[in-house]
Amino acid sequence: ILNVEQSPQSLHVQEGDSTNFTCSFPSSNFYALHWYRWETAKSPEALFVMTLNGDEKKKGRISATLNTKEGYSYLYIKGSQPEDSATYLCAFRRGYNTDKLIFGTGTRLQVFP
Amino acid sequence: GAGVSQTPSNKVTEKGKYVELRCDPISGHTALYWYRQSLGQGPEFLIYFQGTGAADDSGLPNDRFFAVRPEGSVSTLKIQRTERGDSAVYLCASSLRGTGSYEQYFGPGTRLTVT
């Protein structure tokens, strides 16, 4: 059984605060790690696809790091804004021969003005 | 360009009824995926199509669930004899598999409620 775990389950921060959350995944047969942002009533939006150990990706105020040897990824949001409020999902892809994404349960972020 | 679209956005049905959920992928995307998200869970893989054929249907929970993609574009997920436990958000995604792109692009989902 492959488990992808995310923590915390939910997070409430004030506008301007920086925040981060964790995604843990199996370290064996790693192929890719995806991060998505999912706002209510919208499509999950792709943030990053990460494939290399030590990889760091950045998109505006959001960045992510990857450690495939120990099986974790961090997502950072600098200077949170109310529009960052969403559920952040990570998904693990194991091996080249499968396209199946295994998702965590997500971290629900609420940013208060 | 147009993203992945799904219809209907909401579907309420009675236990025991048959439902069909439709997915229109991004034009030109060869791969299409179905996932479902039950309350309090992350999205769970159901089935993946490459072209017209199901390349991996290992996530379909039982034989009440069936999906087709007859022309390699639009896909329909069919659920027979619905049960209350089938209530979930059904997500569809598409990708350009085989060209080096790893990304799966999602639609907004169909919220299915079985009463």
Image (tube, grey):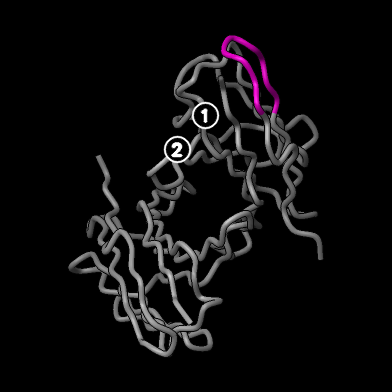
User: Are the residues at dot 1 and dot 2 in contact (C-beta closer than 8 Å)?
Assistant: yes
**Do the residues at pointers 1 and 2 share their chain?**
yes
A111 left or right of B1? left
Q: Which corner quadrant holds the C terminus of chain B? A: top right
Residue A84 falls within the magenta-colored stretch = no
Counting from the top left corner in percent of width and height, residue A76 is at 37, 81
Q: Work out whether B40 lies above or below B78.
A: below
x 49%, y 64%: residue: A36
x 49%, y 65%: residue: A86
> SS at mark 2?
loop
Q: Work out whether B38 lies above or below A72.
A: above
Counting from the top left corner in percent of width and height, residue B85 is at 45, 23
Q: Residues within 10 Å of mark 1 (few under 14, many from 20)?
A: many
Identify the residue under disc 2.
Answer: B38
Residue B13 falls within the magenta-colored stretch = yes
> SS at mark 1?
loop
Distance between the Cα atoms at labels 1 and 2?
Answer: 7 Å
Q: Which of the numbered marks, if any, corresponds to residue B87? A: 1
Amino acid under disc 2: Ser
User: Which residue range is magenta in the image?
Assistant: B12-20
Nearest the eye: A43 or A1: A43
x 38%, y 44%: residue: B40
